[in-house]
Image (cartoon, coloured by chain):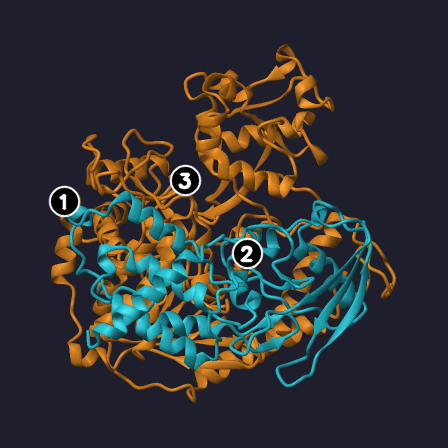
Amino acid sequence: MKVTLHVWRQAGPADRGRFARYDVADVSPDMSFLEVLDVLNQQLIARREEPIAFDHDCREGICGSCGMVINGRPHGPERATTVCQLHMRTFPDGAELWIEPWRARAFPVIKDLVVDRAAFDRLIQAGGFITARTGSAPEANSIPVPKRDADLAMDAAACIGCGACVAACPNASAMLFVAAKASHLGLLPQGQPERSSRVVNMVAQMDAEGFGACTNHGECMAACPKEISIDFIARLNRDYLKAVIRRPW
Amino acid sequence: MELRAKIPSGPLADKWERHRSEIKLVNPANKLKHEIIVVGSGLAGASAAASLAELGYRVSCFCFQDSPRRAHSIAAQGGINAAKNYQNDGDSVFRLFYDTIKGGDFRAREANVYRLAQVSASIIDQCVAQGVPFAREYGGMLANRSFGGVQVSRTFYARGQTGQQLLLGAYQALSRQIGLGKVTMHPRAEMLDVVVVDGRARGIIVRDLVSGAVSAHAADAVVLATGGYANVYYLSTNAKGCNVTAIWRAHKRGAAFANPGFTQIHPTCIPVTGHHQAKLTLMSESLRNDGRIWVPKAPGDTRAPGDIPESERDYYLERLYPSYGNLAPRDIASRRAKEVCDEGRGVGPGGNGVYLEFRDAIARLGRPVIAERYGNLFEMYERITAEDPFERPMRIFPAPHYTMGGLWVDYNLMTTVDGLYAIGEANFSDHGANRLGASALMQGLADGYFILPYTIGDYLAQMKLDRLDTAHPAFRQAEADTGERVRRLLAVNGRKSCGTAAACRATGPASPRPSSRSADCARSSGATSTSAARART
């Protein structure tokens, strides 16, 4: 099959950027979308043009490195699928695709489709952890955790930190990412001592990074390759409200 | 070269306890003066960096990804072993030790493996305290499952994402230390060389993968937690960025390499579909519990699997190993699959595949039971191949995915270069010739949380504190060597790889359109475009 790609090319953070058109022939339906970019890059390098920069690593949909907007949808049209696991058979022959990086103030473009997601790391540094010094842990079974809580915590913990939720949100909000981490840790007994400070600190950091506010569009959940539920946002809001009322902790 | 393993004397069971009590400690005030470099942020690297920072050392951690959370440990599916004996089924430290040694064909270092089994229980305690959402029983206690090669149930798991959850636990502990200013994190940085001064590792040379700038970093000790070398094979299940530079450069600087031939070829991966393919995807070994592996009896049989009658099928594992059947150990299952494909009996495009069929299990147990057990895996397979395993047998083929060999280390996890440590998959010591399932995660975390933080102190306590900065001639020399190597590579100017100029098959100078039809061509150009893209980003 053949595809036409309009790829966002931006030489660096200061460059304005533009779409460049590429026609790629001999695409196999069994290729992943990233493999089409590999093939295109091979051709670009052979023509002594600059290859398209994009983040990728595991190509199994778990590391969260890859991510790009395809025809307006983060990670493309397939439900619950990262772009590395998106196969070309999803698209009709002759498809015309517009490829853009994540667009959010908190995720500045580094080059082409590569954005700087260090803001997510700083959100975790602000409170997305349980303080447990190595060696200080009690016997693992000393605190039972109801299966229901453990399962729900796991649903939230499945987040791969790709940033699709931010890219999908009209406000470029990081609420789903923060809510997933706050819920994962807040649902477990081990996470209780820092539950209030965690949500307050992470929300403050989210504002400081320039992420927008949540206005309940639900686009994040629709784009999430791990189908993380916006129920966790309700949980975060409740924890946040309780924490600020109870202040100081 | 003289290899001194420094294994403590005394009975196996007492070695670690005694060693821990006898090795030198670094005074808390002095810890603040020691700088340690940790390269890699997977299970071993992140846990080591976090634990060393908690102890008070100044730590710099480097990873090539944009965030430490993306290291390839994240892709581990199955689980992590620990001798907790929660199932009351007779597990013990000795049994875990013995299973590991035996699984590795008695080629691992006994003292290291015994210590690994001893600290395994603490790993689970630590991870639970960090909030790793392990699977639970209805009563709230931790659940276990069995893995290949053992008769007890000692594997802890978090759905099919155990590696992800353990890594996030270590990443969060590391993030806390970064937030506190105890660890300086250098993401998008690739280590290019180790700097050795007077026989001791004293720093590294690093390339910033955004700017391309090469810089030098000094420290009192260097820890390599940079994973294995399965990507020396053209296609493996390793991530694209796992390019082995770090341990290779360390080897060139004098660190001995042990057992490089001990690579694990995993029997159940999705076969290659074409020359464009970037890497292989692993399917969990658990599929072999209910699936039957077969190929047609006649070479070159291209009929659809459903059209091949029972009498013309060769269930070769069941035929050759009646007692193990389809659950034959990984290495055996892999070798036999390769053999039948070499005989021309492989199935699917290119003949590089064998069938793994669930027809009989579905008939016996019903579709809902199979869907509950393997639903996620079937969905993943269908997404990649567009074939429904309920309707048509899966096609699988062996692929390299883990390397037991690595840098030689002594009992303290130090390589043959003083002050240069190797932990996790990067070292060679714990798995012998074959690793048991669910033991890679255990070893990475054991090294990072509970072994290196003690043993590195013994070295630092005995070294004279001599401030060394990157102005030292050894750093200048290593930087110059690195620059020269890069210059030489760029000067090759690509006549033999289609990434830069001519297509592989073209004999003349640059042709405008690369031929991507030969596998060799795709091979060399793929490598070139990846490294070129990375060098320029």
- Measure the C-alpha gap from mark 1 to mark 2: 59 Å
For the point 45% across and 86% down, the residue is B473
Quadrant in the picture for residue A14: bottom right
In which chain is the residue bearing label 3? B
Chain A colour in the picture: cyan
The chain that appears orange in the image is B
Q: Amino acid at mark 2?
A: Ala
Which of the two residues, B374 or B458, is positioned nearer the viewer here? B374
Q: Dot 2 corresponds to which residue? A: A222
- Residue B6 position (above or below residue B479): above
Circles 3 and 2, Cβ within 8 Å, touching? The answer is no
Which of the two residues, B254 or B532, is positioned nearer the viewer here? B532
Q: Dot 1 corresponds to which residue? A: B11
Q: Secondary structure at mark 1?
A: loop
Q: Amino acid at mark 1?
A: Pro
Counting from the top left corner in percent of width and height, residue B262 is at 46, 44
Q: Amino acid at mark 3?
A: Asn
Circles 1 and 2, Cβ within 8 Å, touching? The answer is no
Same chain for marks 3 and 1?
yes
User: Image quadrant for the C terminus of chain A?
Assistant: bottom left
**Left or right, B465 with reference to B372:** left
Residues packed near mark 3 inside 10 Å, few (<14), some (14 to 19) or many (20 plus): many
Q: Dot 3 corresponds to which residue? A: B434
Q: Secondary structure at mark 2?
A: helix
